[in-house]
Amino acid sequence: DFLGEIPGFEAACCCPPNSPLMAKLKERDIRCFPYFQKNLHQRGVIPKGLALLGLMRAMRKFRPHVLHVNQAGATRIALAACWQFKIPCVSHVRLLEDVEYLNALQPSPRHLKHLIAISPPMAEEIARQPALREIPCKMLLDAYRLLGKRETNPEVPPEWDLVCAGRLSESKGQELMIGALEILRDRGLRPRTVFVGEVNEFGRKLQERVRELGLSETVGFAGHRDRMEEVLQ
């Protein structure tokens, strides 16, 4: 949405083949280069080398003025490509382990020109790292603050007590949350809970687990939502 709405600004995305985002990017006339590799943090040297070659292939075709790394864990590969093309790199930091990873890289401010933090706590953690202090950091989006004025009617109870939003994945901890809901139920507490995210194969396993534990009356799955703020309100 952001890339497609800036007048006079041309962007392209280099992403893994069959990425779910590709259809939405193409709807906004954003060029896609499906040359990257997914799950690089779980893979070895050869896939990382192929990811670098794919990124450089995309950069040769598009000739960008700046490279934005949407996942900070790919910054080492991005910096290598930027060094070859003599352009600056910007890295988007979402995870605490990526802050540690970037600090260990000890990147030069001449090459890694800017950091973007996903939240105030992430920006604070970046500021604590000695190798990152000289790199400007911007907190681009506070995802925990609702946009606009929040209007509530105390006479109308909220639909949900807990909202868990994000991709349904083993790495995200949703199965742990369901186990916690079972413990609360056994202690006489039954918070109404909704998981928001596309119900993929792992999501179906979560749904089955909810049925096994007898939590179906208070735990729901809303699927993918474009307007997350409506659920949170």
Image (spheres, helix red, strand yellow):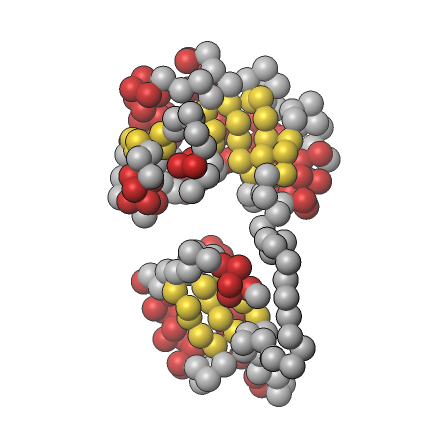
Give residue 226's position: percent from left, percent from top. Answer: 42, 56
Q: Residue at x 36, y 29 (%)?
A: 12
Vertical side of 233 occupied by 101: above or below:
above
Give residue 7's position: percent from left, percent from top. Answer: 43, 29
Image quadrant in which the C terminus is located:
bottom right
Vertical side of 182 occupied by 205: above or below:
above
Is 182 placed left or right of 44 in the picture? right
Taking the image as drawn, is residue 188 in sight?
Answer: yes
Is 218 placed left or right of 23 in the picture? right
Give residue 180's position: percent from left, percent from top. Answer: 56, 73
How many marks do you count on the picture?
0
Q: Residue at x 63, y 34 (%)?
A: 138
Q: Residue at x 70, y 27 (%)?
A: 133
Residue positioned most to the bottom: 188
Give residue 113's position: percent from left, percent from top. Answer: 58, 21
* Quadrant position of residue 23: top left
Q: Residue at x 39, y 42 (%)?
A: 39
212 or 137, which is in the foreground? 137
Image quadrant in which the N terminus is located:
top left
Vertical side of 108 occupied by 213: above or below:
below
Is 181 placed left or right of 44 in the picture? right
Taking the image as drawn, is residue 78 in sight?
Answer: no
* Quadrant position of residue 198: bottom left
